[in-house]
Image (cartoon, rainbow, N blue to C red):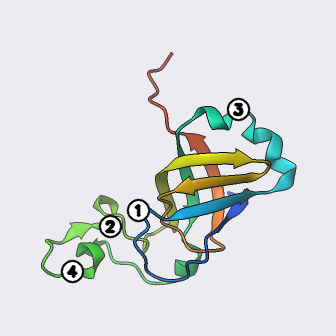
Amino acid sequence: MLTIRPIGHVKNGINGPADFKDQVSEIVIDEALQDGLFRLERSDRIIVIFVFDRNIGNDFKLRLHPRGDRSIPEVGVFASRSPFRPNPIGVTEVELLSVKGNVLTVKGLDAFDGTPVLDIKPAEAWDGR
């Protein structure tokens, strides 16, 4: 059995569709995990892994038109950024603006207010060394 628990949540006041590109959000990390943020501020960009918690139990299609726009050719769900997926997991690379205590301020996170955050990682090229 796989057990995953959130490490924090998103705080941004957004509860519906929005243009997230320039949106500033906070990620509030569980205080018990705060020490895990040590030196994260060295990264300009981070990867945020979160749950599309409002889509749990919703139907998904294996093929779809991106953004529901029928003028765009159909693609497979794994070739899209649709939030309706077999596993409701979102991954977004964002700009890290600041780290203050257990609160990260980021820009460009496409997640709603209260969204559970599963993990964060520095967005650095990995060359295997």
Q: What's the distance in space between the residues labelled 3 and 1, CA to CA?
A: 25 Å
Mark 3 residue type:
Arg
Label 2: few (<14), some or many (≥20) within 10 Å?
Answer: some
Q: Where's residue 99, x and y in %? A: 69, 46
Mark 2 element type? helix
Q: Where's residue 45, x and y in %? A: 51, 42
Mark number displayed over residue 34 = none
Mark 3 lies on residue: 39
Residue at horizontal 40 percent and vertical 71 percent from the top: 19
Q: Along the polypeptide, which appears first: circle 3 or circle 1?
A: 1
Mark 1 lies on residue: 21
Q: Where's residue 106, x and y in %? A: 57, 54
Q: Where's residue 44, x and y in %? A: 53, 38
Extreme residue in the top direction:
129
* Residue 50 in which image quadrant: bottom right
Q: Along the polypeptide, which appears first: circle 3 or circle 2?
A: 3
Quadrant, the N terminus: bottom right
Q: Is residue 48 left or right of residue 33?
A: left
Q: Along the polypeptide, which appears first: circle 4 or circle 3?
A: 3
